[in-house]
């Protein structure tokens, strides 16, 4: 489990509009990489291009290479559906399936793909995934209640449990805590620390402290100018990025002097 | 020992904030008077219609009084309230009067015989609408079997695959045009279609179903489209992110989430076409006998039964006219039952939880 990601010369388009330009980045396995930067600079767009969710939007496409363990995700013969099974994603707003119970939500990846499982096997997956998402103790008594009956923070952990239940190699998180209160946020940050032992984790965040707390490596994205595409400005170990970044724009952003 | 509560002296700001108001019992009393006027009108030779007009003028006293006491702004508010309420009552009048008339004139026709006998060999008293109920239920059921898959799949195409492509916009346009097709044209279309296969003078229950489908499909497409639109995109993305293919996402996430609304929409579409007369008159024809076979011969339906019983009552006319009202009442009850089912379905099928 857990694979590293190498991105070379990636350009991301929405139709004619070039949103993100010339990204080169290496995301190491079993570590947390944080993307920071002002709104609209293409962090989320870039994150979504890492599991081919980007092309769900009509007219959107990329050019360049995204290598996971040496395999190009955008090669002709790659099936985006299979790519997404291996590279899971957690979204900004908790989005449990409203028609499903808590247990069914965890099993959604298997169930929706009509994978046959024995009852005991399914129960194991539910318990394992919920335990790893730190939600088991809170919901074990009410696994058949609807997923939407949980609080926001619990719903987000349910979504994480759902994402790891399909045993992906990489976990992408798009501002997973921005809709949550500080307590739920800290629970999820602890969880990220746990999960990085097994997964490659990429997290987009607007919260500088969060990036500093959870990540091993930080990437700063910024717009080249108004109407210009977003680009990767600087990449480095989190400590260095927050202490003395090379690029003045990074320093300005991190110190809150702009953006 | 008593302490006197001292009120703070009224401040200047307080004087600005206060306004003169009608006593709370004021408007209520005037409205009760208006209602009483209407009731008196109903019970005396004055008549309900004049009573209602008088009541309208009585209720109009509230804004007038308000203008004197409260001033211009509040009075305007009360005038508009008065107008909106009168529009509501005006809209209610035909609905209530239809209900009163149909229930009043039709309920005397209802009996066990009325529900279990056809009109075969019946002259004068007796007979029933069994053949009409069977025909209406069969033809409408067949129409739903035709329209629901077509309508639902069209809606799925429009929302999930078409987006804003040229094909999708032209389908949307055509569906809108179809909504406006007069029902008689739908009947002629079905007749013309069946004449191609079976020759002139064809009468068939399933032809009626085809005609009704023409009217029903646009309604189904529109309501399903609205419901699918309401399914948050986040759910689709969550499903894609788990590596679920698009068609499974639609079948297992989007449709179940929208199920309650879709079923409600379909039920209302059925209720909309079940009372159609003109197309059935052309293609399903009329008969006095029970016919269970959609593909063979004429089939009676409740609306057509009502029409023919009123237009050709025979001698004596009274029993036939009574049966017409009875059939109208049964049709009304079926439509009400369908609406009730739609509400129950949307209540029980909607996703549980706080969403």
Image (cartoon, rainbow, N blue to C red):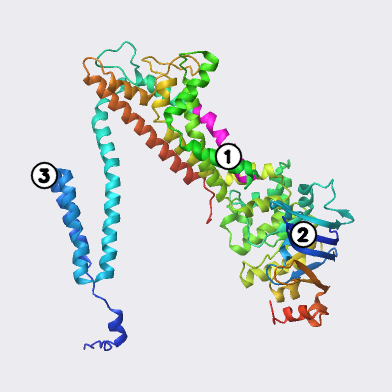
Residue B155 in sight in this render: no
Category of crowding for the residue at label 3, using alpha-carbon neighbours closer than 10 angstroms: few (below 14), some (14–19), many (at least 20): few
Residue A173 belongs to magenta span: no
The range drawn in magenta is B142-160
Cα separation, mark 1 vs mark 3, equals 56 Å
Subunit bearing disc 1: B
Identify the secondary structure beneath mark 1: helix
Residue B59 in sight in this render: yes
Residue A24 image offset from top left, x and y in percent: 85, 65
Residue B144 image offset from top left, x and y in percent: 50, 31
Cα separation, mark 3 vs mark 2, equals 78 Å
Tell which of B115 and A226 is nearer to you: A226
Identify the secondary structure beneath mark 3: loop
Identify the secondary structure beneath mark 2: strand
Category of crowding for the residue at label 1, using alpha-carbon neighbours closer than 10 angstroms: few (below 14), some (14–19), many (at least 20): some
Q: Which quarter of the figure is the N terminus of chain B placed in?
A: bottom left
The correct choice, above or below, for B141 with respect to A68 in the image is above
Label number found at residue B171: 1
Subunit bearing disc 3: B
Q: Residue at x 90, y 56 (%)?
A: A70
Q: Nearer the viewer, mark 3 or mark 2?
A: 2
Tell which of A93 and A234 is nearer to you: A234
Would residue B239 be found to the left or right of residue B313 on screen? right
Identify the residue position indicated by label 2 in the image. A12
């Amino acid at each position: 489990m857990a694979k590293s990601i190498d991105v070379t010369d990636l350009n991301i388009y929405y139709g004619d509009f070039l949103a993100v330009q010339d990204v080169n980045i290496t995301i190491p396995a079993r570590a947390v990489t944080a993307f920071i930067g002002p709104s609209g600079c293409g962090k989320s767009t870039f994150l979504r291009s890492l599991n081919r969710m980007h092309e769900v939007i009509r007219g959107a496409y990329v050019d360049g290479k995204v290598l996971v363990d040496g395999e190009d995700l955008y090669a002709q013969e790659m099936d985006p559906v299979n790519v997404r099974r291996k590279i899971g994603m957690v979204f900004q707003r908790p989005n449990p399936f409203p028609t499903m119970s808590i247990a069914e939500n965890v099993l959604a990846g298997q169930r929706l793909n009509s994978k046959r499982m024995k009852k005991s096997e399914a129960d194991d997956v539910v318990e394992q995934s919920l335990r790893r998402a730190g939600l088991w103790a809170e919901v074990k008594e009410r696994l058949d209640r609807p997923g939407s009956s949980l609080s926001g923070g619990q719903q987000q952990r349910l979504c994480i449990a759902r994402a790891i239940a399909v045993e992906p190699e990489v976990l992408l998180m798009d501002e997973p805590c921005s809709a949550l209160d500080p307590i739920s946020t800290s629970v999820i940050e602890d969880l990220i620390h746990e999960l990085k032992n097994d997964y490659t984790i990429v997290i987009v965040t607007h919260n500088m402290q969060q990036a500093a707390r959870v990540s091993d490596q930080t990437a700063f994205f910024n717009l080249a100018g108004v109407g210009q595409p977003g680009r990767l400005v600087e990449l480095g170990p989190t400590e260095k990025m927050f202490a003395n970044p090379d690029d003045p724009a990074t320093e300005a952003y991190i110190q809150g002097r702009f953006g | 020992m008593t302490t006197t509560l001292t009120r703070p002296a009224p401040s200047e700001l307080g004087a600005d904030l206060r306004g003169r108001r009608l006593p709370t019992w004021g408007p209520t009393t005037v409205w009760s008077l208006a209602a009483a006027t209407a009731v008196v009108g109903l019970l005396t030779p004055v008549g309900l219609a004049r009573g209602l007009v008088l009541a309208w003028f009585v209720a109009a006293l509230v804004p007038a009084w308000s203008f004197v006491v409260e001033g211009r702004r509040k009075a305007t508010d009360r005038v508009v309230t008065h107008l909106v309420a009168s529009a509501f009552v005006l809209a209610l009048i035909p609905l209530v009067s239809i209900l009163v008339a149909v229930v009043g004139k039709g309920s005397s026709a209802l009996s066990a015989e009325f529900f279990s006998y056809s009109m075969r060999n019946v002259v004068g008293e007796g007979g029933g609408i069994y053949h009409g109920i069977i025909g209406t239920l069969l033809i409408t059921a067949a129409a739903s079997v035709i329209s629901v898959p077509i309508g639902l799949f069209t809606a799925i195409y429009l929302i999930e695959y078409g987006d804003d492509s040229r094909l999708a916009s032209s389908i949307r346009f055509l569906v809108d045009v179809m909504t406006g097709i007069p029902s008689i044209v739908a009947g002629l279309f079905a007749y013309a279609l069946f004449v191609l296969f079976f020759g002139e003078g064809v009468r068939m229950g399933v032809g009626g179903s085809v005609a009704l489908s023409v009217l029903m499909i646009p309604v189904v497409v529109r309501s399903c489209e609205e419901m699918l639109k309401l399914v948050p995109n986040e759910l689709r993305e969550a499903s894609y992110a788990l590596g679920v293919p698009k068609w499974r996402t639609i079948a297992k996430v989007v449709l179940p989430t929208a199920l309650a609304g879709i079923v409600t929409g379909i039920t209302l579409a059925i209720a909309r076409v079940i009372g159609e007369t003109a197309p059935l008159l052309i293609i399903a024809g009329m008969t006095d006998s029970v016919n269970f076979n959609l593909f063979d011969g004429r089939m009676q339906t409740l609306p057509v039964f009502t029409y023919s019983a009123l237009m050709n009552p025979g001698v004596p006319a009274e029993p036939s006219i009574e049966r017409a009202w009875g059939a109208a009442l049964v049709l009304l009850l079926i439509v009400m039952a369908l609406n009730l089912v739609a509400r129950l379905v949307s209540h029980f099928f909607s996703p549980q939880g706080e969403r």
